Image (spheres, rainbow, N blue to C red):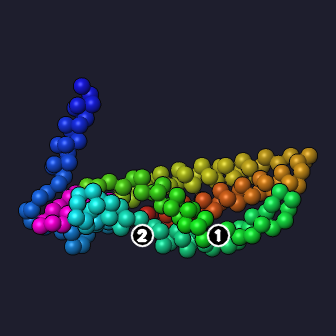
Amino acid sequence: MSYLLSVLIFIFLSCSLFSIGGSKPDWVDGSSSKYPFKQFMQGVGRGSSKAEAENNARVELSKIFKSNINATSKTYLRAFDVINSDGSNKGSKSASEVESLSKISTDMVLEGVELVEHYSEKNSYYALAVLNRSKTSKILLDKITTLDGTVDLLMKSSSSNESTLERIKRLKKSARILIDREALNEEYRIVSQSG
């Protein structure tokens, strides 16, 4: 019974959020007045189907983050050389690892994206995706604080009889966490508009 009710609510909401024809909303050709820039990040997607338009709206939002995070990640990963267990240098991180870090980081932020409006005219569908700046900023700050605590714990957990190899492993783990932290911090700067 609960499942049926959920399906009916979903159908109702889908129909109410999907305008067919009618006057063209302001967000199709610009930004939405209902979702001001200071409070929301916006992405408009266009496609030959509703699903394609929604996906493209999410992609438009992700583009905002991807270029900034890639630049930050490359800077940090260039400085982060991998050390083998015997202490020899294994080399720098590859471009695919930078892309992976960027994708993981961007995916974390885009979890909060909401598809709030739809519009259709002729054979084109449009979707408006928004990301609430305040909510996302809080989530990112919580994640950053958690990572800071983890690094702090790793750095304080050394003992006098710890081997050099164990210290290197702990430092390596801390460095990886700090790279993730910097990617989150870059996302926070973008979302919070703190530059």
Compared across the picture, whether 79 is left or right of 194 comes to right
Name the residue tied to disc 2: 64
Give the residue type that dot 2 points to: Ile
Q: Is residue 85 magenta?
A: no
The local secondary structure at tag 2 comes to helix
Identified at 23% across, 42% down, the residue is 10
**Magenta span: helix, strand or loop, mainly?**
strand
Crowd around label 2: few <14 · some 14–19 · many ≥20 (10 Å)? some
Task: Name above or below for residue 3 compared with residue 176.
Answer: above
| Residues drawn in magenta | 117-130
Task: Name above or below for residue 93 compared with residue 165.
Answer: below
Q: Position of residue 57 (x, y in %)?
A: 31, 63
Compared across the picture, whether 190 is left or right of 124 comes to right
Q: Position of residue 123 (x, y in %)?
A: 15, 66
Check whether the beta carbons of the residues at disc 1 and disc 2 lie within 8 A of each other. no
Q: Which mark is residue 80?
A: none
Give the residue type that dot 1 points to: Ser
The local secondary structure at tag 1 comes to loop
Identified at 17% across, 54% down, the residue is 18
Could you give the CA–CA distance between mark 1 and mark 2, rounded to whole angstroms?
23 Å
Compared across the picture, whether 187 is left or right of 41 comes to right
Q: Position of residue 153 (x, y in %)?
A: 72, 47
Name the residue tied to disc 1: 94
Count of numbered labels shown in the rendering: 2
Q: Position of residue 142 (x, y in %)?
A: 53, 50
Q: Quadrant of residue 1?
A: top left
